[in-house]
Structures are given as structure tokens and as C-alpha cells.
Image: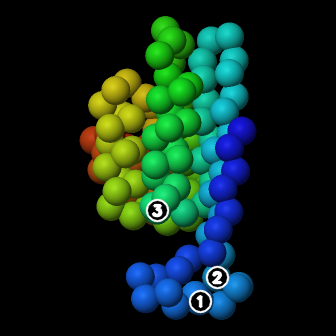
Amino acid sequence: MTVWQGVCIDRDGYEPSKAVQDMFRVTVQNDPERTVLKVEGRLVQPFVRELKECWRNAAGGAKPMILDVCSVTFVAPEGRNLLTEIHRAGGTLVGSGPMMNSIVEEITGQPVSERN
């Protein structure tokens, strides 16, 4: 499991309120029949790089890769690019809620159904 937590600081060194903190987590679940990456938080830099590293470390076997993005709260363009790359490499994207379902549908070209 990889957990990253940090404070946003802009290029001029301005640090927003301590209440404005990003949290990102990727939980890797290796089952005998598949590998699941559960992603939580905002998919922005530097978290996109972290997810890419987790994905590359977890991929490589013959097992299917499932990327659970149900708990993602925001996706920056670079995050969308990575999700597209994972999908094109054979990963299955699983979303929930209007925002993530819309993003998953745009990337895969197929409608997704709400998870209960």
C-alpha cells in the first residue's frame, strides 16, 4: 500500500491554509485471479506519478488489472491521460458516481453502471 499526503504550495511559495491538504492513497490487492488498485483522493501531480509507479510495479503478470477509481474526488488532465494509458494497456476501470462514471465512459467508450 502506498500513502502520500502533502500540502499544496504554488510556484511563488504561497502555502494555502493547512486545511487545504491533498491526500492520495493507492491500495494494491493481489488476488490469485486478478490485481486490484484501489485509488482514493485527488488524481493530480505528484500523485499521478505515484499511481503510474504503483501500476507499473503491480502490472506485468498474466492476471487482469482492475483500477478502482470509485473514491477519486478529482482528476486533472495528466490523471485522465494516465487512466487512458492504463485502459489501453488492458486495465479495467471501475468508477462510481456521476463524475467518475463520466470519465470512465469517455475513456472506455462504454457506459458503466452504478455500483451499489
Q: Position of residue 28 (x, y in %)?
A: 66, 33
The answer to whether residue 113 shows anywhere in this view is: no
From the image, tell me which residue sits under label 1: 16
> Do the CB atoms of the residues marked 2 and 3 lie less than 8 Å apart?
no
Mark found first going from the N terminus, 2 or 3: 2
- For mark 2, give the secondary structure: loop
Q: Nearer the viewer, residue 2 or 64?
A: 2
Task: Say which mark, if any, is on residue 20.
Answer: 2
The answer to whether residue 46 shows anywhere in this view is: yes
Determine the CA span between mark 3 and mark 1.
Answer: 17 Å
In the image, what residue occupies the spot 71% across and 85% down? 19
Determine the CA span between mark 2 and mark 3.
Answer: 14 Å
Q: Is residue 60 left or right of residue 58?
A: left
Q: Residues within 10 Å of mark 2 (few under 14, many from 20)?
A: few
> Do the CB atoms of the residues marked 1 and 2 lie less than 8 Å apart?
yes
Q: Position of residue 36 (x, y in %)?
A: 61, 30
In the image, what residue occupies the spot 43% across and 88% down? 12
Front label number (1 vs 2): 1
In the image, what residue occupies the spot 39% across and 35% down? 86
